[in-house]
Amino acid sequence: MKFQPLLAGTLLLAPTLALAQSNQAPTPAEIFSQGTQYTNVKISPTGDYLSVIMNHEGKDKLLILNTEDLSAKHIVYFPGNAQVGSYSWVNDERVVVAKEYLKGWDDRPLYYGELMAVNADGSKAAYLFGYNSGQQQTGSHLKKNTAIQATAYVLDPLPDDDRYMLVNAIPWNGGRSLDYEQLQDVYRVDVYRGTRKKITRSPIGMASFMTDDDGEVRFVAGQDRSNNTRIFYRNDGEWIDTDKLNIGLKDFTPISFTEDPNSVYASASLAGEPKAVYRVNLKTGEKQQIVSDARVEPDNFWINGQNKQLYAVEFANGYPTYAFVDSEDQHAVYLKQLLASLPGHQVRIVSETRNADKMVILAFNDRNPGDYYLFDTKAVKLRHCCVPWKA
């Protein structure tokens, strides 16, 4: 549920995102050959590139690899006390990265909502969103858009739209710290120029949004001032409290839309029993229980990355079991193949190409914190990925 110098390396310079080539900067191959630990592995929409977050000299950097031979291509990093945070592939060639700051008094990186973008080949770097955006810096070829005092998060990269992504942003409103109770705005942002258009505003604070397969913002969950969770449904641009939909379920939480744009899969309880998965028609209130376990609630939901629809539910009662909502979904076949190929492990599909011909898999158990694999769904082959490349 989604409620939410570039030849050898990219040095994104604070505070202006000027591009620079440092003579002292290590090449991607030099860093990659050191055998550093990698996390947050993703594959580009066409499968040409793999990307990983790696920690080098105490800071997180983004390394882009050629998928075919795992050769290191580019590295994206910030100078000083800044580092790469979360990131998303927003089209076949472009990544958007969040900029974080390391402070000695805090073990956790600080994030002020700045989003930058760059192509995999090192071209067209841009400061897309943040308080430090503005006019072009003297001596820099990077143009920047208007500044905004808000903390932004990539809501939906809109994989079928090469030009735009959706961002949810929390306004600062002059406070000394970020107030998550503020109503959040959703913007449609140009991933090359950073120009933005406001789409909607949440009706409640502590907001977590959900989009449908068309990239439309359809649900938001949040907390009111009494700390009660409330969920709103967006219909024709208007927010409707789901309590008014006469669904007749407790703890109603949308998981995904179905093939019908007016129906959702949701976890809920009918009368206080462990939550089950229901199919709910938002227009009529009609509901049907799809998957349940008498002893435990769902532990993980498996969503098809192509159509954003639920296809399997994972339960954990001592060991994981799986119930398939749609056994005809090709992703259900892939999951069964993965479970058979990696016995004794739980698996997660953490990233996939647009046509799902390649997937990044994380396999883990109580003795193994996790290994990444590249899964070729057509050849039905797994290979361990991100083995350090040797120069």
Image (cartoon, grey):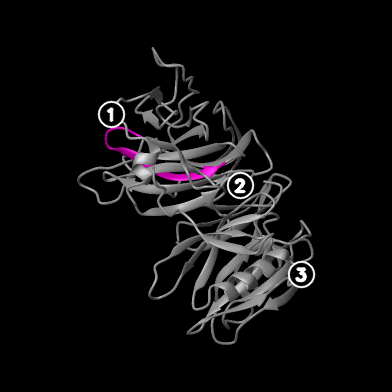
* Residue 158, position as x, y percentages in the image: 64, 43
Q: Is residue 90 magenta-colored?
A: no
Residue shown at 72% from the left, 70% from the top:
279
Within-10-Å neighbours for mark 3: few <14, some 14–19, many 20+? few
Q: Is residue 85 magenta-colored?
A: yes
For the residue marked with disc 1, what is the amino acid?
Gln
For the residue marked with disc 3, what is the amino acid?
Glu
Instruction: Judge left or right: residue 310 versus residue 42.
Output: right
* Residue 191, position as x, y percentages in the image: 57, 32
In the structure shown, which secondary structural element does the residue marked by tag 1 occupy? loop
Q: Which residues are magenta?
A: 78-89
Q: Is residue 205 visible?
A: no
Q: CA distance from mark 3 to mark 1?
A: 54 Å
Query: In the drawing, what numbered circle is on residue 111?
Result: none
* Residue under pointer 1: 24
For the residue marked with disc 2, what is the amino acid?
Gly
In contact (CB < 8 Å): disc 2 and disc 3 = no
* Residue under pointer 2: 47
* Residue 289, position as x, y percentages in the image: 71, 77
* Residue under pointer 3: 328
